[in-house]
């Protein structure tokens, strides 16, 4: 049996059901674990209270608390990982595969330095890039047939737990102790902040267990932002504090889990698209005919949208909640994205970037896929004239105005009808319109016609 392996943690910040750790501990006598605070990524973050860094830091604290073996480095992993591998004299470096364009480029350079000592394993997804293809060998471009093929391809082994032998994870005796343990978050240039949910593997497992009794009602409750109807696991899946296999295994023990499983397959679909069409990560649309649309929106409207000051109560509530927490309910993501693109006629790329900078669960593939779906530029069988009415969305999915009252307190005293639209039909104010609530910045009916015309232009 080979002597020593290094597991490089990236999007798999846990110890349970961990493919890289399981493989390393099955084939090596001693295993070390390391994480790199990547300055190529961190140096681009201007908010020094970035919630994602706090989530990562706290999740790593839990790993070190459980093992006392975590090695943390701060800098460029292209330089640090090969140097650490040589210093520890490991014969194998194992990491979970990551299909983001930056990660692929980074790993290519690391592999060139380490040659066959470096390997990546499938862990973040059940199926990746070319594992689900059409009969002609090309990638699927529409979700429904992809989902059907995905389900038909699955075997019990795909969901099997990958159990590491944690007794083989050991601290390296020859390593400078200053790198053993987690860096203080201030040392890497960031500050502690507050999160709307607990970080780490234990919290992820607890959140899954709390959700399972409700999973049969997910199809009904998932669209109401005032209900605790979703799992809230997207952050944990993003950073790998829970494995995707664990989620599927747990879901299959419960009746009525199909709809939630479908949402997990959407995640696989968007990652497959990004892996096969990396230009999506560079601002290109999936539908080439929409790539050169000239979005005529007003920059001042973009600022009002970000601030939750559009005059559309559900949009404003969603954006204010997002600014305060870094979280947005999935239904609301669609509502605000479609409002930005179809009502304000603002380029979806600006919204995508704003979400990328502020989402606690930011994932390039899912964020891009969701924005392009809403903008009618992405992989979708639905036509461009699907345009949400933000008032009807509010009446349907926040019927009692509970979510709006929480986040737009200036409307809290309105009745359950007027809270969704506290104006005349044409957007003019009434005697009951609160003085401190803004006028609507656009009229939906007019903007809908403009959006359709925009897509019809040659």
Image: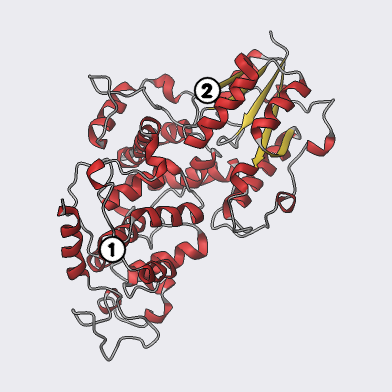
Question: At which x and y percent is residue 316?
Answer: 38, 70
Task: Classify residue 225 as left or right of residue 83.
Answer: left
Cα distance in 3D space between marks 1 and 2: 45 Å
Q: Which numbered disc, 1 or 2, marks the residue closer to the eye?
A: 1
Which residue occupies 42% across, 66% down? Answer: 306
Task: Classify residue 207 as left or right of residue 141.
Answer: right
Image: 449 above or below 126 = below
Location of the N terminus by quadrant is top right
Q: Which mark is residue 121?
A: 2
> Can the viewer see residue 120 in this picture?
yes
What secondary structure is marked by label 1? loop
- Which of 171 and 113 lies nearest the eye of the viewer? 113
Which residue occupies 26% across, 53% down? Answer: 293
Label 1: which residue?
A: 296
For mark 1, does the 10 Å Cα neighbourhood hold few (<14), some (14 to 19), or many (20 or more) residues?
few
Which residue occupies 46% across, 32% down? Answer: 99
Question: At which x and y percent is residue 318?
Answer: 39, 64
Task: Classify residue 124 as left or right of residue 91.
Answer: left
Which residue occupies 29% across, 65% down? Answer: 344
**Mark 1 / mark 2, whichever is N-terminal:** 2
């Amino acid at each position: 049996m080979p002597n020593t392996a290094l597991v490089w943690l990236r999007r798999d910040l846990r110890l349970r059901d961990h493919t890289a750790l399981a493989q390393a501990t099955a084939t090596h006598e001693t295993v070390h674990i390391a994480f790199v605070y990547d300055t190529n990524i961190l140096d681009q973050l201007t908010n020094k209270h970035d919630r994602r860094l706090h989530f990562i830091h706290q999740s790593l604290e839990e790993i070190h608390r459980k093992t006392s073996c975590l090695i943390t480095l701060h800098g460029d992993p292209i330089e640090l990982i090969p140097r650490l591998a040589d210093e520890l004299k490991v014969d194998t470096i194992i990491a979970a595969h990551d299909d983001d364009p930056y990660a692929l480029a980074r790993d290519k350079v690391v592999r060139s330095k380490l040659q066959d000592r470096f390997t990546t394993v499938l862990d973040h997804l059940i199926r990746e890039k070319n594992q689900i293809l059409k009969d002609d060998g090309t990638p699927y471009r529409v979700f429904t047939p992809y989902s059907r093929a995905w389900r038909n391809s699955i075997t019990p082994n795909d969901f099997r737990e990958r159990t590491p032998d944690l007794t083989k994870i050991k601290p390296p005796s020859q390593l400078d102790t200053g790198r053993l343990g987690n860096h203080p978050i201030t040392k890497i240039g960031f500050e502690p902040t507050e999160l709307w949910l607990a970080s780490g593997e234990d919290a992820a497992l607890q959140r899954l267990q709390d959700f399972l009794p409700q999973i049969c009602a997910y199809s009904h409750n998932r669209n109401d932002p005032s209900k605790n109807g979703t799992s809230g696991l997207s952050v944990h899946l993003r950073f790998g504090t829970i494995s995707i296999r664990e989620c599927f295994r747990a879901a299959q023990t419960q009746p009525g889990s199909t709809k939630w499983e479908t949402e997990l397959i959407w995640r696989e679909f968007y990652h497959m698209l990004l892996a096969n069409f990396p230009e999506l990560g560079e601002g290109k649309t999936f539908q080439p005919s929409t790539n050169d649309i000239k979005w005529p929106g007003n920059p001042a409207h973009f600022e009002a949208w970000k601030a939750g000051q559009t005059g559309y109560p559900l949009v404003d509530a969603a954006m204010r909640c997002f600014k305060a927490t870094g979280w947005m309910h999935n239904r609301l993501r669609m509502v605000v994205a479609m409002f930005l693109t179809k009502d304000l006629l603002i380029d979806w790329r600006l919204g995508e970037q704003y979400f990328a900078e502020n989402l606690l669960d930011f994932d390039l593939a899912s964020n891009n896929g969701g924005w392009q779906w809403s903008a009618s530029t992405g992989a979708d069988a639905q036509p461009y004239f699907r345009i949400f009415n933000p008032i009807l969305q509010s009446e349907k999915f926040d019927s009692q105005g509970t979510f709006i009252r929480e986040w737009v307190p200036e409307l809290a005293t309105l009745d359950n009808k007027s809270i969704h639209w506290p104006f005349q039909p044409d957007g003019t104010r009434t005697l009951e319109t609160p003085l401190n609530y803004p006028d609507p910045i656009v009229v939906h009916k007019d903007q809908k016609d403009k959006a359709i015309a925009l897509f019809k232009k040659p």
